[in-house]
Amino acid sequence: MKKALDFLLSILYLLYFGIMLLLFHIVQLVAYNVFGKEAHKKTVVWFNFCLVHGWYLTGSHVHFEQRTVLPQPGERPIIFVANHQSMFDIPGLIWFLRKYYPYFVSKIELAHGIPGISYNLRVGGAALIDRKDGKKAVIEIAKLGQRIHDAKGSAAIFPEGTRSSSAQMKPFAAGGLMALLKRAPDAMVVPVVIQGTGRFNPKGLFPLTSFTKMSWTVLPGLEPAGKTPDEIAQAARQAILDYLDCTYTKTCESD
């Protein structure tokens, strides 16, 4: 019965998902080319609002918690460092962190072929990297670091490099974080714990797992001064692991 419900609700959500991709592709084109970059940013935020809240069509639950006080936008650069479970990690980060509008590091293959998403990656300021060309990838990430340094903006990166299951995080590679911090050395590094998105689509887009609990939790920031990028990356990973462990054992302290 549950499997049949997964199939039914997956079809419902994916129809909705496809409509949102096409609709907001057109909206983004108009916003960017007629009204400019700021208007385009607003359409991206609302695009991701629709994607996130569409998950309720599957009976799933979405939760956001910020367990720390962050600098206000424009006060200093911020680098959000998150574990990576699913393609659905990103809509949650964009919507829940919309106040900071983080720019993402993304593989270049996603810059074409996906309505709405690919266009935003091309014109929205993301660092598009070719994993086969490490030197060029570092240059692109460094450019993003310079942008957030100059604008006191924010970036988001998945140091695992690829998706992992919720049960076992991959090691954090420090290379991308190193490139960002080299150009934005005063950035605060903020760990973000993502839970449940891997269970939501464990085998791709179909079928999705209905009635899944998904959450995004912002942990206290890390100051990079006096630490190597590798030390910062491992500290961020440990903070995420500790939070995942305490939620599993139900020993997390509420703020």
Image (spheres, rainbow, N blue to C red):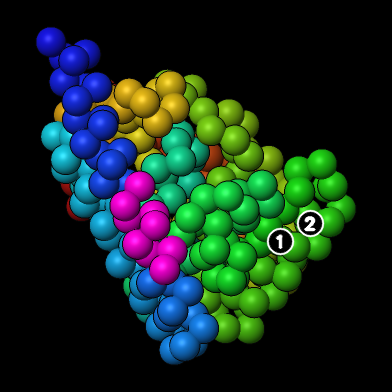
Q: In the rendered structure, which amino acid carries the disc numbered 2?
A: Val
Residue occupying the point 35% across, 62% down: 23
Does 148 sit above or below residue 110? below
Q: From this viewpoint, is residue 76 visible? A: no
Choose between 226 and 9: the one closer to the eye: 9
Q: Quadrant of the N terminus?
A: top left
Where's residue 211, x and y in %? 17, 29
Q: In the rendered structure, which amino acid carries the disc numbered 1?
A: Ile
Q: From this viewpoint, is residue 119 visible? A: yes
Where's residue 48, x and y in %? 34, 59
Residue occupying the point 22% across, 22% down: 6
Residue 19 inside the magenta-drawn segment: yes
Report which residue position mark 2 lands on. 138
Extent of the magenta region: 18-26
Residue 77 inside the magenta-drawn segment: no
The residue tagged with tag 2: helix, strand or loop?
A: helix
Relative to 180, is 25 on the left or the right?
left
Residue occupying the point 59% across, 35% down: 162
Mark 1 touching mark 2, by CB under 8 A?
A: yes
Label of residue 141 in the image = 1
Q: CA distance from mark 1 to mark 2?
A: 5 Å
Disc 2 crowd, CA 10 A, few/some/many (<14, 14-19, 20+): many
Choose between 1 and 249: the one closer to the eye: 1
